[in-house]
Amino acid sequence: MLWQKGRRSDNVEDAGEGGGGGGPSFGGRGLGIGGIIILAILGMVFYKDPTALLGQGEPGAAPQQQTQSAPHQAASSDPQVDFVRAILGETEDTWGEIFAANGQTYERPKLVLFHGGVRTACGSASSAVGPFYCPGDKKVYLDLDFFQTMQQRFHSAGDFARAYVIAHEVGHHVQNLVGVFDKVSDARRRGARMEGATGLSVRQELQADCFAGVWANKSQQRQQWLQSGDVESALNAATAIGDDTLQEQSQGRVVPDSFTHGTSAQRVKWFKTGLASGDIGKCNTFSGSI
């Protein structure tokens, strides 16, 4: 992936070690194997709101008041940070164009880099949760060590696979801007099922995958930056983090009633749907079968 072509975003912040402190005492990535397995089962990767996992709230809940150090702009001299800035910049340009075409203004999210743990408007979270989006402060959170975890644990390497991670979380930001989070929260309060193979959580995650595919389509049209094997690397990442694959690896059996993100096949399907069409209108995962 020729990611160096991308415009660098100024919206990447560095929260530093512990993200201001006060988070759960998981000791960075030193979480016990039992905890890691539980996190994998519940959706360790791309969890849209870690507070539901950590027992500190629910998606769409009012922001918690936090006292913490203000993040500062991340240093661009680090190649990994430069990569993140380039990908985020391209998501800003892509979604800015899509929103403008519909007579709207795209509100750019901040992306906060942290290490070990971080405090957010949605509560405190450990790196073990994986990359996530907090609707309370409209920020994406990422521990760069996760990219190494992708390669070692999920055997997903390649720049485009890493770009897919960022694009997926930005997809949640888009959902927040257009009201999907509010509608899901309202449905949850009315008793709609969140977990399970056809639950709202799965549908919300698959839509974010589709939005990531839409971004990939549009950014390729503008940048022509994908190379041989790039798409396959992203599809491999989507396959590796399906609920069924994670459950099979961690507990030796698949429990569809506990799905939160969708199967490997579903994640690949919806990413490819967005990638092939470049049309957000094709990403309605809340209607019909998925």
Image (spheres, helix red, strand yellow):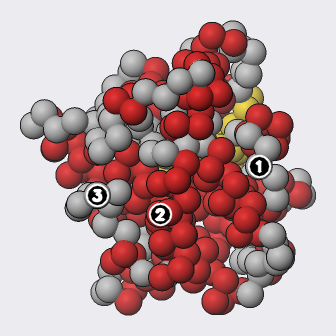
Marks 1 and 2 sit apart, C-alpha to C-alpha, by: 18 Å
Rate crowding at label 2 as few (under 14), some (14 to 19) or many (20 or more) other CA atoms within 10 Å: many
Marks 1 and 3 sit apart, C-alpha to C-alpha, by: 28 Å
Q: Is residue 156 above or below residue 152?
A: below
Q: Nearer the viewer, mark 2 or mark 3?
A: 3
Question: Where does the image place residue 186, in percent across and percent down from the top left?
Answer: 16, 44
For image coordinates 46% across by 21% down, the residue present is: 54
Question: Where does the image place residue 255, in percent across and percent down from the top left?
Answer: 43, 27
Residue type at tag 2: Trp
Residue that mark 3 sits on: 289
Residue that mark 1 sits on: 156
Q: Nearer the viewer, mark 1 or mark 3?
A: 3
Q: Quadrant of the C terminus?
A: bottom left
Q: Is residue 53 above or below residue 204?
A: above
Q: Quadrant of residue 280?
A: bottom left
Q: State the residue in front, 84 or 249.
A: 249
Residue 121 shows in this picture: no
Residue 270: which disc? 2
Kindly state the secondary structure of the residue where label 1 is placed.
loop
Question: Where does the image place residue 273, in percent across and percent down from the top left?
Answer: 48, 72
